Amino acid sequence: MNYIKKGELYNGGEYDKFKQHFFTAIDRIASMPMVMNKVASGIITSEDVDLVKFLYTVGCCTEEQLYHYAALNNIQDVKSRLDRMLFNLIINKFVCTDENRTVSYPADACVFYCMHSGGQILLEQMADEVRVVDWNSGKCVMGARKLIKTCAIAEISLRVLCTTGVRTEVTPYPSAVLFDKRTKEVRHMSSLASYRYIFPDGTDDVLLLDALFTYNHRYDVKQAIDTYVSFLTTGHWRKFYGKMEEAPKLLILVEDVENAEKIGEEFARILKDKEVNIYFLPMKDLVNISDEPPYFPLLAYDSNEQRAVRKDCYFFS
């Protein structure tokens, strides 16, 4: 049996034919009395709600990422909490293999966690600041490529959500409809996530996150670049982020440095002399993310040197 192993998620493996194997069937439905009884009896606590909020925000994540989030937020007894929530259909977990079914989890398998039906009930009843919109357990079913992107988002969101002194709003898969008055063309922009930082002095900033990989159709990558240039340079962004003094920053996940240089060169060609803050993060560098600013080993494209260069960016501080 072949499967995604711990520590190999971002190694560029051939996972296209891999399937998810859930600990609990995704069509099992938790009842509100059952979930709320666990809350009333103290079996499910506010710390558990916090873990579920993180899972809802990121969609799904690896076991290591969930433990990391718990450590950053001083949540103890994580294994016991996860076991209780699994048993009560509040969360679910799965592995990815190339077999049609699996009866056990290999010890070195990468284990992924997501919200289950009971988690939706828990957030709706216990987390007033969270608005559960358009969610069902089927949202957790995804192919390997989307799973890897989702976990990459979770890796970045870990740092965003745990930044002190900054109030953060995370929006998964934000979208915008753009109308080009010159060409009469309607474009649809969709990112993987947006992060809005609200600083103590009332100012705010936005970072858009996307992924452009070479296995995407060439036209799709070029179209995405054209759309981002239009959004960030023509004032379209003000319709969505009008309180900001400058356009959002853009962080793009790429496969490697070579891919960052190809995409950066295309951005530079279209932008010409226009100023836009665009950064690249190779997938393999996700393992080198730090818990201290500047967090990410980012790249930026240098038009003069015609290559990608290292760039320290203090997004959240």
Image (tube, rainbow, N blue to C red):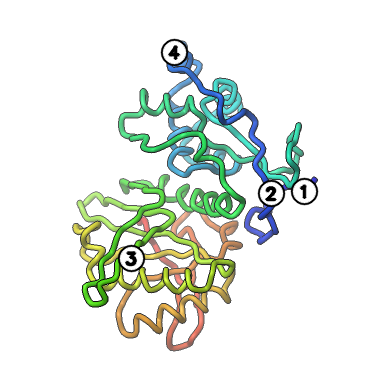
Seen at 70% across and 58% down, the residue is 14
Going from N to C along the chain, the mark reached first, 2 or 4, is 2
At a point 43% along the width and 17% down the height, the residue shown is 32
- Residue 204 image point, x, y percent: 25, 55
Check disc 2 and give the amino acid type: Phe
The residue that mark 1 highlights is 2
Residue 104 as seen in the image, left or right of residue 271: right
Most foreground residue, 163 or 124? 124
Closest to the camera, between mark 2 and mark 4, is 2
The amino acid on which the numbered mark 1 sits, given as a three-letter code, is: Asn
| Marks 2 and 3, the one that precedes in the sequence | 2
Q: Residues within 10 Å of mark 1 (few under 14, many from 20)?
A: few
The quarter of the displayed image where residue 179 is located? bottom left
Which residue in the protein does label 3 denote? 187
- Residue picked out by circle 2: 18
Badge 3 density bin: few <14, some 14–19, many ≥20, Cα 10 Å: some
The amino acid marked with disc number 3 is Arg
Alpha carbon of mark 2 to alpha carbon of mark 1: how far?
8 Å
Query: Marks 4 and 2: in contact by CB < 8 Å?
Result: no
Q: Residue furthest bottom?
A: 304
Tag 2 and tag 1, C-beta contact below 8 Å:
yes
For mark 1, give the secondary structure: loop
Vertical arrangement, residue 136 with respect to residue 234, above or below: above
Which percent across, then down, holds residue 301?
45, 78
SS state under label 4: helix
Please, what secondary structure does the residue beneath circle 2 have? loop
With 22 as the anchor, is 115 left or right in this view? left
Q: Name the residue under label 4.
A: 33
